Image: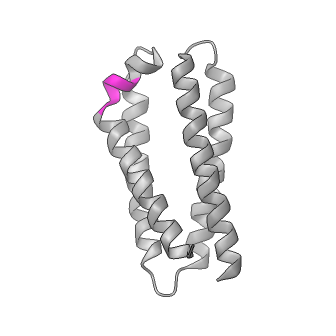
Amino acid sequence: MKLKTILIINAISSGLAGVLSAGFAQELSNLFQVNTKTPFIEIGIFLIAFAIIVFFTAFKSPISTGLTKLIIAFDITWVLASIIAVIALYSSISIVGILLILTVSLWVGMMAYLQGTNLKIS
């Protein structure tokens, strides 16, 4: 798969996750069994902004190595922050919330890996 394709997939999945997180913040707070929807809105806004940057990067010609490395760094940071969040919040969120965090983290980690592998090939 080409780097451009992987970046587009990352942009679409990040944007969709952002819209769902912000748009369904109350439902997610219920699912996570927490009393506030603010973190879901904030994460949603961040993901929408991130998706725009990733989408822009995918359509640069040539694709910017620096921006791609920054995207990979954000993806790796997301994975590490997810692991920390699960450890820190384990007793205060639902098992469904933990599983959602870990599932998204696996997807983001795969995006980072594929982007990094294809950046070396390009």
Q: Nearer the viewer, residue 42 or 94?
A: 94
The quarter of the picture where the N terminus appears is bottom right
Residue reaching furthest front?
A: 1
Residue 98 spot, x, y in % from top left: 58, 25
Q: Nearer the viewer, residue 28 or 69?
A: 28
Whether residue 92 is situated above or below residue 109 in the rendered picture:
above
Residue 86 spot, x, y in % from top left: 64, 27
> Going 31% across and 31% down the picture, which residue do you hit?
24
Asked if the magenta segment contains residue 67, the reply would be: no
The quarter of the displayed image where residue 23 is located = top left
> Going 42% across and 20% down the picture, which residue do you hit?
31
- Left or right relative to 110: residue 46: left
Q: Look at the image and give the residue range highlighted in magenta.
A: 24-28
Residue 118 spot, x, y in % from top left: 65, 73
Whether residue 31 is situated above or below residue 9 in the rendered picture:
above
Residue 120 spot, x, y in % from top left: 71, 77
The quarter of the displayed image where residue 11 is located = bottom left
Secondary structure mostly taken by the magenta-highlighted segment of the chain: helix
The quarter of the picture where the C terminus appears is bottom right
